[in-house]
Image: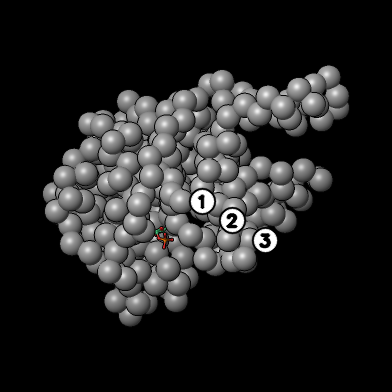
Amino acid sequence: MINKCLFPAAGYGTRFLPATKATPKEMLPILTKPLIQYGVEEALEAGITTMAIVSGRGKRAIEDHFDISYELEHQIKGGSKEELLTEIRSLIEKCTFSYTRQIEMKGLGHAILTGETLIGNEPFAVVLADDLCHSDGVGVLQQMKEVYEKYQCSVVAIEEVPINETQKYGVIAGKLVDGTDDTYRVSDMVEKPDPKDAPSNLAIIGRYILTPDIFDILRNTKAGKGGELQITDALLEQAKQGRVIAYKFKGKRFDCGSVDGFVEATNWFYDRIKS
Ligand code: G1P
């Protein structure tokens, strides 16, 4: 069972300065909903109710968002605006939120290791809120949970990217599992390789299911690309033992960590509500 979802949310969001100077990048909205709320909804849809958020300095707005605002709610009670808070109220009722702070930004692997105190010794999901996923059918995390239940090992979500973009992602090599066309047993993975060194064009996107031995592996992993502790390097240790599955998810992903992706997501979601 996957009961907990970790949200690394301590990063500075420098690509969105000055918007992210005093506002967490996870709170930037696509239409009226902040990015992290989409991630929490996706986790809840997968039956996960414990949200573990690795936060940092200047990120208090995230805690306030997943809390009741008595003054505001009193103010709009009984009026036409009240329904605008229905969704977030329901999330707050159904989920619990716990927080820990990452003191130094030393990479995604370090952020995940910081979350150990909230996760403990059980398999867990990871959502990077700036990768916004949408699926008209089953949500991406729910799809991955089903893959985890079958293979009982770590699962990363992948998609094909143009080969000249591999330096933006963790990239995998692997073989399709017999009888599937979307599930790979991973044999190698490289963090942000140059296209000429990339083992494939199958890029990891910001959705993971990790087995808890990843914490010990992370503790013993040296800084990698960019001098940071990389989750990709720790996963490679599991992959060498055949314990990582890469799953080509069904749905769309928007890279809302980039201005282009953010605008694309905004237009796409807007078109949907208008049509
Ligand atoms: C992180 C990971 C990378 C992964 C990406 C997905 O990179 O390190 O392996 O492909 O997320 O969004 P970041 O985008 O944080 O630089």
Which residue is labeled 1 in the image?
58
Q: Where is residue 200 shown, x and y percent of the image?
A: 34, 67
Please indicate whether residue 168 sits to the left or right of residue 94 in the image: left
Which of marks 3 and 2 precedes in the sequence?
2
Q: Residues within 10 Å of mark 2 (few under 14, many from 20)?
A: few
Q: How is the image coloured?
A: one colour
| Whether label 1 touches label 2, CB < 8 Å | yes
- Mark 1 vs mark 2, CA separation in Å: 6 Å
- Mark 2 vs mark 3, CA separation in Å: 21 Å
Name the image quarter holding residue 204: bottom left
Q: Residue at x 83, y 19 (%)?
A: 78
- Tally of marks: 3
- Whether ligand 1 has any atom under 8 Å from the Cβ at mark 3 is answered as no
Using the rendered image of the protein, determine whether residue 67 is visible from the camera's viewpoint: yes
Closer to the camera, 120 or 10?
Answer: 10
Which residue is labeled 3 in the image?
263
Rendering quadrant holding ligand 1: bottom left
Q: Residues within 10 Å of mark 3 (few under 14, many from 20)?
A: some
Q: Is residue 253 above or below residue 99?
A: below
Q: Where is residue 141 shown, x and y percent of the image?
A: 45, 38
- Whether ligand 1 has any atom under 8 Å from the Cβ at mark 1 is answered as no
Which of marks 2 and 1 precedes in the sequence?
2
Which residue is labeled 2 in the image?
22
Q: Where is residue 7 shown, x and y percent of the image?
A: 43, 43
Q: Residue at x 42, y 28 (%)?
A: 50
